């Protein structure tokens, strides 16, 4: 428990502040808020509105196609013959099976749109996770460089006074100056990388405020993770839609044709006005699909099965690899905790021996820098553990 609290303290020391020049601050927003902001900026645009509009335009009427109107006029060539005029309205009507199939297609399209939105959320989650993960690492290295500079500046002042009083040679002073310059370079590089990550985060989300909590909930191993993955669900939904679309060409689903006819017969003896109905019912009792339809079905089935198997294997291998890496980092963290405790004791002894000049200057410098490196490595390993947890959630298809 003490080691855990120690880890939290060290991580807060190294990564709690943002770069001052970036005008970023921590606020009351969550990772989910950052995801929603990114999707509002880049995805909830005209393209998504068009997709939603297409999904909501349900063609649920009874007409299978556009109606047609036909006229005919027959004039007799005989003196006592009759003339005929006819107008006919043809209405192609959907069968009950067609209506049911259309409703299934509409429902399937809504499901596909839901999975598409989830996949888009997962994509933006990946970008945010990568950006904030890189920011945490770069910011940690920046804080490490700042801390190292603080220690080296104090050490340089101390040895400058000793050199001025002729109690030490110029060599240790120059060694400290060199380390300080290296730390300055390290600070500049880390500062630039951190600033770049903050700018990328701002461009991605449109926000200038970081989430108040960058640690996600621990990933829980789920044996059904692959079957629940949005990519798998999306493939399944697309295949179901494909099967329904292929079924549309089934002859048993051919529409009925209703004709409304008005006819006038004009002869020398009488005038007759007639109104009537006619129904044309296709007699396809069996599904006599063409060879082309069968070929299309089996080709689509093979493509679906191949894509599903490849996606499932990629997810499975990714989860196994990330879990293995996570176990390694957790074991490594326990060893780093012991190393950190030893480093603290060595640092205390180094400071006491430094005041009594009992420690050589090179050894003193090395011990001071090693203590900083160990603290940084401990915090960095903890960040990597958090990143692997995020990676596991990403691979498992869990958005922010």
Image (cartoon, rainbow, N blue to C red):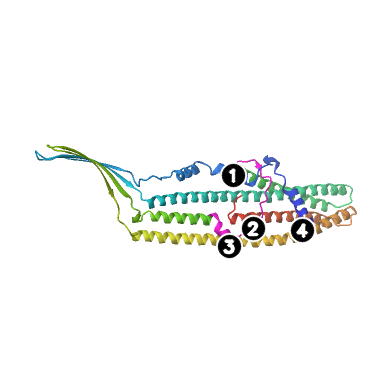
Tell me, yes or no, whether the highlighted magenta stretch contains residue 158.
no
Query: Dot 4 corresponds to which residue?
Result: 337
Q: CA distance from mark 4 to mark 3?
A: 30 Å
Q: Which residues are magenta?
A: 203-230
**Residue closer to the observer: 38 or 262:** 262
Q: CA distance from mark 4 to mark 2?
A: 25 Å
Residue at the far right: name it: 356
Tell me, yes or no, whether the highlighted magenta stretch contains residue 216.
yes
Q: CA distance from mark 1 to mark 3?
A: 29 Å
| Main secondary structure of the magenta stretch | loop
Q: Are marks 4 and 2 in contact (CB under 8 Å)?
A: no
| Mark 4 Cα-neighbour bin, 10 Å: few <14, some 14–19, many ≥20 | many
Tell me where residue 4 appears, x and y as whole percent. 76, 55
Q: Earlier in the sequence, mark 4 or mark 3?
A: 3
Q: Are marks 4 and 3 in contact (CB under 8 Å)?
A: no
| Residue 181 in view of the camera | no
Does dot 2 land on a helix, a strand or a loop? loop
Tell me where residue 250 appears, x and y as whole percent. 36, 56
Task: Give me the residue at 34% from left, 56% from top.
Answer: 252
Query: Dot 2 corresponds to which residue?
Result: 220
Quadrant where the N terminus sits is bottom right
Task: Report the disc number at residue 367.
Answer: none
Does dot 4 land on a helix, a strand or a loop? helix
Q: CA distance from mark 1 to mark 4?
A: 37 Å
Query: Dot 3 corresponds to which residue?
Result: 317
Query: Dot 1 corresponds to which residue?
Result: 36
Query: Mark 2 or mark 3: which is in front?
Result: 2
């Amino acid at each position: 428990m003490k080691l855990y609290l120690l880890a939290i303290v060290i991580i807060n020391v190294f990564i709690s502040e943002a770069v001052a020049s970036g005008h970023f601050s921590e606020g009351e927003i969550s990772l989910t808020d950052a995801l929603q902001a990114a999707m509002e900026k880049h995805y909830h645009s005209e393209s998504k509105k068009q997709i939603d509009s297409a999904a909501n335009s349900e063609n649920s009427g009874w007409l299978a196609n556009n109606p047609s109107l036909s006229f005919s006029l027959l004039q007799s060539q005989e003196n006592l013959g009759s003339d005929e005029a006819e107008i006919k309205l043809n209405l192609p009507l959907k069968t009950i099976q067609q209506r049911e199939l259309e409703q299934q297609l509409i429902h399937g399209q809504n499901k596909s749109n839901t999975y598409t939105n989830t996949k888009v959320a997962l994509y933006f989650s990946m970008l945010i996770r990568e950006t904030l993960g890189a920011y945490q690492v770069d910011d940690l290295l920046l804080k490490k460089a700042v801390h190292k500079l603080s220690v080296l500046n104090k050490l340089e002042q101390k040895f400058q006074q000793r050199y001025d009083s002729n109690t030490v040679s110029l060599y240790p002073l120059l060694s400290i100056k060199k380390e300080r310059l290296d730390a300055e370079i390290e600070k500049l590089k880390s500062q630039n990388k951190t600033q770049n990550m903050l700018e990328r985060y701002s461009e991605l989300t449109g926000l200038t405020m970081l989430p108040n909590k960058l640690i996600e909930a621990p990933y829980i191993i789920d044996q059904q993770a692959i079957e629940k993955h949005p990519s798998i669900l999306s493939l399944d939904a697309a295949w179901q839609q494909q099967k329904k679309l292929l079924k549309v060409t089934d002859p048993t689903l051919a529409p009925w044709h209703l004709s409304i006819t008005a006819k006038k017969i004009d002869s020398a003896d009488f005038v007759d006005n007639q109104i009537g109905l006619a129904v044309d019912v296709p007699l396809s009792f069996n599904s006599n699909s063409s060879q082309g339809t069968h070929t299309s079905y089996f080709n689509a089935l093979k493509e679906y099965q191949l894509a599903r198997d490849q996606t499932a294997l990629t997810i499975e291998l990714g989860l196994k690899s990330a879990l293995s890496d996570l176990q390694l980092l957790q074991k490594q963290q326990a060893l780093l905790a012991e190393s950190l405790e030893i480093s603290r004791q060595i640092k205390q002894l180094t400071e006491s021996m430094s005041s009594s000049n009992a420690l050589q200057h090179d050894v003193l410098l090395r011990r001071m820098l090693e203590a900083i490196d160990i603290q940084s490595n401990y915090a960095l390993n903890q960040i990597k553990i958090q990143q692997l947890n995020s990676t596991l959630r990403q691979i498992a298809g869990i958005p922010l």
